[in-house]
Image (cartoon, rainbow, N blue to C red):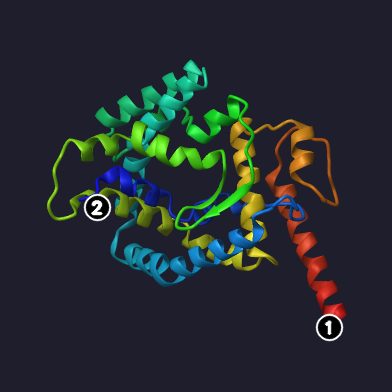
Amino acid sequence: MPSLPRLAPLSRLLPALAMLLLLAGCAIAPPRTDDPLEKFNRKSYAFNMALDTHVLRPVAVGYTKVTPKPVQTSISNFFTNIRLPISIANNLLQARPSAAMDDTGRFLINMTVGLAGFFDPATKMQIPLKETDFGITLARWGLPEGDFLMVPFLGPSTFRDVWQYPVDGYLFDPLSYFSSNHKFHWGQYYIPQVVYFIQMRAQLLDADSFLKEAYDPYAFVRDAWRQNRLNKIYDGNPPADVMLKLQQGGSNQNNQQNYDPEELLKEQQKWEQQQKQQKSGGA
């Protein structure tokens, strides 16, 4: 019978949707052209979205109807906290001891005072959350990101970032150690991860309509995801030349070093409107 680590990637099921948490203020300039696997990626994206439409979203809607908001918040707090060892390990691998100490402090406080992480007193104590993963670790080591890859069931990634699934899921995730040291006979090992991605999907219901407004949803998800990853790698302040490279073909490439997602959202909406006008004019 498979163990929990093999289900760990499902906790990241459709990161294209998880990324929507940022889409209210994080979008893209005109789509990039460096997508050599685009034909495969679009088919994979269509599969993932069909799965979400027919399975994940209905389950998430039902979950929100029967689960009180305070309970949803507690569940979200628990999984955010229980996964902190992943960030702690990667912060150490990135030679960032201060960030590792912050996350360690959050983890210990929330596990004790926060009653196993269901409450979040660490945030009230203003202890910052320094989430990271093995994909960012590889980036900080200088490994090129490689081609963009839309993975079936998992969502957006690159040849570099896809390594976070086996490394973080098998080596650093506390739930993996829990499952490897307990024998289950009725599939109980699925419960934590299933609840996790249902809760994650439920948090994104309000953002569904935002993606539908995109002229090209696949390109929107692809570029917004890559931009979000770049933002994480540079701690929210990527260098101007890196941002310019990311925003290939943008109509308003500025040299600000500060990451301004609202401005990028305006650029995306402007570009989409131009495409719609051109399509209408050519009809």
Q: Could you tell me which secondary element the residue under label 1 belongs to?
A: loop
Say left or right for 90 vs 120: right
Residue type (three-letter) at the residue carrying disc 1: Ala
| Closest to the observer, 262 or 9 | 9
Residue 110 to residue 57: above or below: above
Q: Tell me the residue that label 1 is attached to.
A: 283
Say left or right for 96 vs 73: right
Of the 4 image quadrants, the one containing the C terminus is bottom right
Q: Could you tell me which secondary element the residue under label 2 belongs to?
A: helix
State whether residue 87 appears in this view.
yes
Instruction: Identify the residue shown where x is 83% and y is 36%.
Output: 255
**Residue 20 image offset from top left, x and y in percent:** 55, 54
| Neighbours of disc 2 within 10 Å: few (<14), some (14-19), many (20+) | few
**Residue 109 image offset from top left, x and y in percent:** 31, 26
Q: Tell me the residue that label 2 is attached to.
A: 191
Say left or right for 140 vs 153: right
Residue 52 to residue 223: above or below: below
Instruction: Identify the residue shown where x is 30% and y is 58%.
Output: 68
Residue type (three-letter) at the residue carrying disc 2: Ile
